[in-house]
Image (cartoon, grey):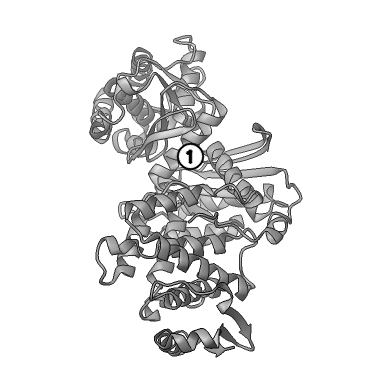
């Protein structure tokens, strides 16, 4: 994997065109409590916010006892995304990245929701893993609030809390915990009632989640602590407006907040300077998590950070676009692929042979439904580079092991959605096509599968093949693989495997694939 997997230079400008606002980038953060849209301009490393929209959707409060997102919560989310879509009119696909977090990581019917949400928004929505969310949070904080000090960054969301340890722009440890202000408030402060018993129980529940990380985020490993979430911002505003602190969050200040909540007895009767109405319903859970964190991790002072997830998404998108514009720069995801190859001891030479062949076939095929930003080609290249990681588990059915690993691994830069896409490609690399029956109608994906399968067959003997020896073209309802006659005659076993492959596609996918010797 010595070369970045980027589109051909001649297509770069075309891939990054089609926008009324080519100087802008946009990020959508679909959190468990709020949805946020941020539009920004990045120029020479400087970040300028152009627009910011926030709506309290409470998607996380819409998960029922069976882990299903209710229709009422779904409608709130779709209505918000429709308004965001109006604001994003004139933006090209390459300028927008939408990410969803813990609620959609948990929701058992998330695919049904995402299908509707993608149509409403007009841009694909990626579900990111907890660790990827944490990495993006740190990227936003480190770029907007740079420092060389070792730091702890905390983000309390609606249904999860992220903790990151890093220095400069590098996150060294990133973890996500399944406890947030919405989930804890629903469980321990039902009906918005505040009691001392509720706060004690909420703190014990939060502590049970964080206890395993006491060594990972030990006080000796960092020199400053920052909070990047809406919870931290809301509590900081209360403390500053009440004159308790200058906005710095301390254990003593949190005890003062908790006492005021208990005195009020309910969120309806709670009156605190700086407390916004939309924060009342989740304040009990947020305070409980904050107090637990400060006590468990010996945080003397927690200060609000300037950056957050949405800014991290924009900076990450900028890096991806830089990789497209400047082919000498790797896509951040390329680095993750190389790390996975190393971790699972992939035969790098074979992986690179298959990757290059699959991309040559893809580009010669010139698929009409390919995304203009080159993501199809990059996904195909990554799948080829990682198609044998399952051999670390077992050579038998290694494609199934590879697919499982890709569907469950944490890989910085990748969303869970994209890793699942790679898992489908890798699952389809060999064997019967019937296992891809639900994807047979996706012509672009099946073309990726075809290119990967053909590349693996062509290099099944783990030997090189002249670059010009193959080409893939559409001809009158069929796909024709052109193959050097001389090379084919010297490799009859490969020709046999290709003939079997053609018969399989016709019988199981109703697609005519033919081999033509030239």
Which quadrant would residue 480 be assigned to in this image? bottom right
Please determine whether, in this image, residue 414 is positioned above or below residue 286.
Answer: below
Q: Residue at x 58, y 41 (%)?
A: 314
Return the residue nearer the eye: 348 or 502: 348
Q: How many marks?
A: 1
Q: Residue at x 39, y 65 (%)?
A: 387
Residue topped by disc 1: 136
- Whether 418 is drawn above or below 330: the answer is below
The answer to whether residue 64 is visible is: no
Q: Please tell me which residue is depicted at 48% across the width and 56% down the height of the picture.
A: 1
Image vertical order of residue 215 relative to residue 428, above or below: above
Q: Residues within 10 Å of mark 1 (few under 14, many from 20)?
A: many
x and y percent of residue 54 in the render?
57, 38
> Which residue is more in the foreground, 451 or 42?
451
Residue nearest the observer in this picture, 304 or 204? 304
Query: Considering depth in this image, is 375 or 498 the residue closer to the camera?
Result: 498
Instruction: Give coordinates of residue 396: x percent, y percent.
Output: 25, 72
In the picture shown, does residue 438 fall above or below 350? Answer: below
| Image side of residue 293 versus residue 241, left or right | left
């Amino acid at each position: 994997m010595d070369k970045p997997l980027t589109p051909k230079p001649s297509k770069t400008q075309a891939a990054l065109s089609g926008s009324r606002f080519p100087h802008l980038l946009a990020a959508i953060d679909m959190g468990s409590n709020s949805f946020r849209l941020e539009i920004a301009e990045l120029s020479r490393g400087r970040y300028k916010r152009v627009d910011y929209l926030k709506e309290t959707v409470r998607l996380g409060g819409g998960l029922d006892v069976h882990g299903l997102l209710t229709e009422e919560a779904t409608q709130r989310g779709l209505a918000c995304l429709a308004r965001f879509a109006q604001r994003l009119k004139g933006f090209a696909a390459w300028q927008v990245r939408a990410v969803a977090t813990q609620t959609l990581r948990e929701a058992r019917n998330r695919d049904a929701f995402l299908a509707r949400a993608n149509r409403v928004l007009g841009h694909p929505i990626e579900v990111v893993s907890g660790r990827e969310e944490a990495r993006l949070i740190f990227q936003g904080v480190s770029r907007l609030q740079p420092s060389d000090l070792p730091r702890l960054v905390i983000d309390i969301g609606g249904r999860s809390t992220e903790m990151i340890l890093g220095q400069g722009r590098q996150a060294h440890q990133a973890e996500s915990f399944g406890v947030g202000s919405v989930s804890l408030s629903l469980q321990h402060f039902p009906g918005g009632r505040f009691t001392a018993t509720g706060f004690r129980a909420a703190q014990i529940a939060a502590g049970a989640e964080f206890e395993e990380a006491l060594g990972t985020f030990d006080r000796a490993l960092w020199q400053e602590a920052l909070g990047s979430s809406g919870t931290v911002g809301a509590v900081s505003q209360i403390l500053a407006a009440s004159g308790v602190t200058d906005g710095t969050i301390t254990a003593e200040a949190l005890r003062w907040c908790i006492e005021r909540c208990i005195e009020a007895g309910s969120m309806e009767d709670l009156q605190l300077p700086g407390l916004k109405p939309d924060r009342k319903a989740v304040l009990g859970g947020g305070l409980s998590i904050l107090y637990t964190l400060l006590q468990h991790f010996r945080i003397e002072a927690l200060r609000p950070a300037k950056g957050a997830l949405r800014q991290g998404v924009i900076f990450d998108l900028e890096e991806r676009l830089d990789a497209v514009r400047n082919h000498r720069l790797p896509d951040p995801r390329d680095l993750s692929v190389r790390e996975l190859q190393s971790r699972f001891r992939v035969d790098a030479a074979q992986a690179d042979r298959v990757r290059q062949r699959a991309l040559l076939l893809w580009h010669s095929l010139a698929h009409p439904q390919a995304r203009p930003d080159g993501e199809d080609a990059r996904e195909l290249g990554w799948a080829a580079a990682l198609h044998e990681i399952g051999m670390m588990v077992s050579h038998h059915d290694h494609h199934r092991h590879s697919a499982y690993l890709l569907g469950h691994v944490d890989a910085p830069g990748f969303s869970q959605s994209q890793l699942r896409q790679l898992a489908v490609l890798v699952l389809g690399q060999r064997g019967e096509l019937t296992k891809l029956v639900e994807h047979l109608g996706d012509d672009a994906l099946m073309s990726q599968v075809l290119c990967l399968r053909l590349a693996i067959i062509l290099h099944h003997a783990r030997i090189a093949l002249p670059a010009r020896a193959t080409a893939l073209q559409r001809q009158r309802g069929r796909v024709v693989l052109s193959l050097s006659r001389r090379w084919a005659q010297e490799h009859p076993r490969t020709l046999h495997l290709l003939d079997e492959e053609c018969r399989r596609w016709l019988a199981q996918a109703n697609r005519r694939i033919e081999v033509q010797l030239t």
